[in-house]
Image (spheres, rainbow, N blue to C red):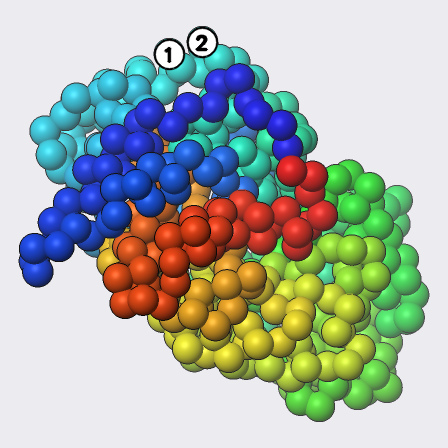
Amino acid sequence: MGGRPGFTVGLLSLALLAGACRDSSGSAAVDPDLARTIAAIRAIDNHAHPMRPAAPGAAADSEFDALPLDGIPPFPVPWRLRAENPEWAEAARALYGLASVSGDTGAAYVAALTAARAAALKEHGDQFPSWVLDQAGIDVMFANRVAMGPGLDAPRFRWVAFDDALLFPLDTRAEAARTPDTRPLYPREAALLKRALRELGLPAIPPTLAGYAESVIGGTLSRQRKAGAVAIKFEAAYLRPLDFGTPAPDSAAAAATYARYARGGVPSASDYRTLENWLFREIARRAGTLGLAVHIHATDEFGGFYSADGAAPHLLEPVVNDPALRGTTFVLIHGGWPRVDETASLLSRPNVYADISMMTLFIEPRQLAGALRRWLSQWPEKVLFGTDAFDGGPAQGWDQGAWLASTSARRALGMALTDMMRDGEITRPRAEELARMVMRENALRLYGLRN
């Protein structure tokens, strides 16, 4: 990718150099020269949810996620993701020059931030999302969205399409009843499947599994690829465990279940699980054939009834080891946190990568530095930068999330690499090389983007 006229590193450099302070042992937490190098890297963001710029009075953007969690029962979030965390106000100050008392989340502050953001939107128009990337030092952001739109154009924004809906062609009422969290989520997937069928010109799902695989799965993936998608995304851990069967599920049993219920009726949990497992592998196989990476949500968060065990990275081992899927690249989104050792084990597979998205927001840089050092000591070519910038309301916009996550990631990377240099594990040139790999070059190679 060529340079961007609006790209600046001044605010990032100041923030990172401020982070190159002294820790409790008296030594610099981040080598200042290394901090400057890291601040200057134009990053590739492997995972985020940017918003389309909307004019005052226009309909709100509702396509930023396939499973927005505002519909599930309220649940607690880690301290760092709470609006009262002063780092969100720091991001607002960096982006808009907005001064506030540390931790202020009152009505006056929210009104001032809303006005400042509206002024920036008016000034930049459809270029507002690209302006946000420039402030955060991000060259390209992978947009996890149901659909793209004005202001989210290539090459600055690349589409990652959601495909969980393809796993659930049959009646999901029994599946949805499993927990209070899943009750509102499954209907969203049903609506997305109906949308996919409309876009394919199909009045209903085909009567056979073979027909569904060819016309619906194949048709959807082809349309997504032609529309510019670089990857597809599964949020399945919000709906069911990531255990997609070992050995590979019986295709005859999956076909029989599909045929039995394609025109109505509610499958048993075990029958549906067999079908889902077969469909996941079929989607992943076809994605690999089309050159689409498969992104899989893997972390302990979020929701009051979310199954942490169901999101464990090791559950994916039979899938990534499947000889039929070795042509498919899998990326563990959010790095499997906190099970970073499980992630490290999977990174030894030739078709597995991991990003640090959301880890850059909900854990402190020092914690993230520990995970990065663990991975970089073994599989440095498999680690990707990511923000998971999202819309958290007027005091926590995706714009602030992009800046905060980018700053945190660079600080954590500086800590990890500084510690590795001090311990004699790497030289300074190697530290700079590793920084470029994580923040940019690994993604360029993985997705075939031009530098």
Cα separation, mark 2 vs mark 1, equals: 6 Å
Q: Are marks 2 and 1 in contact (CB under 8 Å)?
A: yes
Q: Is residue 117 above or below residue 248?
A: above
Q: Around disc 2, counting alpha carbons within 10 Å, would you say few (fewer than 14), some (14 to 19), or many (20 or more)?
A: few
Q: Quadrant of the N terminus?
A: top right
Question: What is the x, y in percent for residue 320?
Answer: 66, 76
Picture layout, residue 11 above or below residue 371: above
Please report the residue visible at 58 percent of the width from the left and 53 percent of the height from the top: 442
- Residue at 77% x, 39% y: name it: 227
The three-letter amino acid code for the residue at tag 1 is: Ala
Q: Quickly name the residue at label 2.
A: 123
Residue 116 showing in the rendered view: yes
Query: Is residue 196 left or right of 185 when viewed as pictured?
Result: right
Given residues 45 and 297, the one toward you in this image is: 45
Residue under the image location 75 percent in, 74 percent down:
326
Using the rendered view, name the quadrant where residue 417 is placed: bottom left
In the image, what residue type sits under mark 2? Glu
Q: Is residue 316 left or right of residue 436?
A: right
Name the residue that disc number 1 marks: 119
Residue 125 sits above or below residue 131 on the image:
above
Specify the quadrant that holds the C terminus. Answer: top right
Residue at 40% x, 74% y: name it: 339
Asked which secondary structure carries label 2, the reply is helix
Name the foreground residue: 368 vs 96. Answer: 368
Q: Is residue 12 above or below residue 184?
A: above
Q: Can you see residue 297?
A: no
Secondary structure at numbered mark 1? helix
- Image location of residue 345, percent across then percent down: 51, 79
